[in-house]
Amino acid sequence: MSRDDTPRDTDPIALHAPWRDRYMQDLSADAAARGAADLPDFLAAYWADPAGDEANHVIARVGADQTGGMILLNLYPYAGGHLMAALGEARPRLLDYTPEQRAALWRLTDLAVDLVERTLRPQGVNVGVNQGSAAGAGLPGHLHVHVVPRWAGDVNFMSVVGRVRVIPSALETMAQRYRVAWRTMGGTARNG
């Protein structure tokens, strides 16, 4: 064992529990049988109602066919300016979309990242997908991509100890800033 391989007190310890595999399989089968039908799909409702974009904090719509989608503010943000990119067509899993739809979703994500960077100039950006309830998806029936602007110190004692998120801007204010930036972008992503 080299010096770099030496475990530290802060390193997690792996506990292999192969006997739990059957439990996990049963749990997955039960979740699949229940499905996500009981959760209202607000993203599909927003996609079907362009007239409600301002009230629903939809920033942009791109395309109109099966590869069409939208960029919108997350109503329960991890950080100020947290956007979501979603196709209009609801699918629970990334691989349930066609290759063309997955490419369209990634192009939409590119636009959302570009919009965040131009508007807020964050020090970093988290981009991620929570596929399924167990992964943290609040809307497991309609896959979407999270684009979260980040700054050094944006997670502090309030969130760690107090379990409170401090969001510095109102959703309406942030939506307005994003819409202005979207118009100046002409609805297209920056190259490079």
Image (spheres, rainbow, N blue to C red):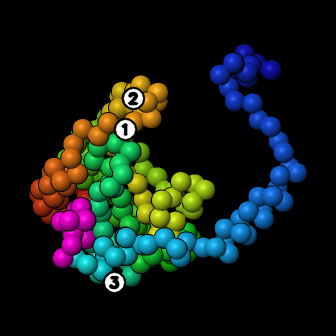
- When the figure is inspected, residue 67 is found, relative to residue 185, above or below; the finding is below
The residue wearing badge 1 is 165
Q: Are marks 1 and 2 in contact (CB under 8 Å)?
A: yes
Residue 128 lies in the magenta-colored region: no
Q: Residue at x 72, y 16 (%)?
A: 3
Q: Is residue 157 visible?
A: yes
Residue 4 lies in what quarter of the image? top right
The mark found on residue 158 in the picture is 2
Q: Residue at x 38, y 45 (%)?
A: 78
Disc 1/disc 2 C-alpha distance (Å): 7 Å
Mark whose residue sits in front, 1 or 3: 1
Q: Residues within 10 Å of mark 2 (few under 14, many from 20)?
A: few
Horizontal and vertical percent for residue 171?
Answer: 23, 51
Q: Amino acid at mark 3?
A: Asp
Q: Tag 1, which secondary structure? A: loop
Disc 1/disc 3 C-alpha distance (Å): 37 Å
Q: Is residue 178 left or right of residue 88?
A: left
Q: Residues within 10 Å of mark 1 (few under 14, many from 20)?
A: some
Horizontal and vertical percent for residue 13?
Answer: 75, 30
